[in-house]
Image (spheres, rainbow, N blue to C red):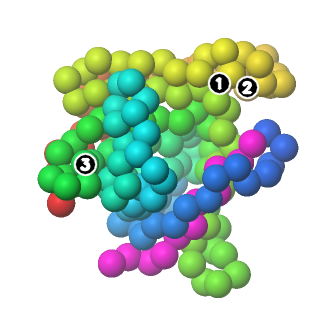
Amino acid sequence: MGEPVTVDKLNLAGEVTVQWSGQVLSQSEQELVLEATFTHSARDLGYVRLAPGDRFVETYYRDRWYNVFAIYDAPDGAFKGWYCNITRPAEITRAPDGGLRVRAVDLALDYFRQPGGREYILDEDEFEALNLSAAERRTARAALGELRALAAAGAGPFAAAGSAAP
């Protein structure tokens, strides 16, 4: 498997709210793709059910205001959809232990797209409640628009879902 990586999801104050580990699948100057396993208890979000052992193929960008998680079912590898977080661009650095570390400030606004194309824009009320500048709000909304366009075109991280299955 690839190089170990630790992911820190941060709030606006820069505090870690969730942390998990994965393995690098690929990386370039602006992008890091990793594989992680869902380790929390089962969660039915209404538009997708997450279960322990589900496989996440996560794409982070140093120059984009989002990340994209392609989610696969634990028992059979069936593709469940894409979960996208609107974030400030990811910081990808070398951790003291030698592995990689990804840190991203979450801006609450999320986007989920099911394999059949149905889409959900999530947590808009939480996004509106954040203390962001007008420029950050515009950039975050533009990032959501970019994600929706990429998903509709089956481009970028939305193109690889079927090929990343186990």
- N-terminal-most mark, 3 or 1: 3
Residue 72 visible within the image: yes
Residue that numbered label 3 is attached to: 73
Residue 139 - label:
1
Q: Which residue is rendered at x = 75% and y = 42% of the image?
A: 11
Q: Which image quarter is the C terminus in?
A: bottom left
Q: Which residue is rendered at x = 17% and y = 45% of the image?
A: 78
Side of 138 where 75 appears, left or right: left
Which of the two discs, 2 and 3, sits closer to the camera? 3
Residue that numbered label 2 is attached to: 136
Q: Which residue is rendered at x = 50% and y = 60% of the image?
A: 29
The amino acid type found where label 3 is placed reads: Asp
In the picture, residue 50 is in which quadrant? top left
Q: Is residue 3 inside the magenta stretch?
A: yes
Side of 32 where 48 appears, left or right: left
Q: Residue furthest bottom?
A: 97
- At mark 1, the secondary structure is helix
Q: CA distance from mark 3 to mark 1?
A: 32 Å
Give, as a single range, the part of the protein colored magenta: 1-11
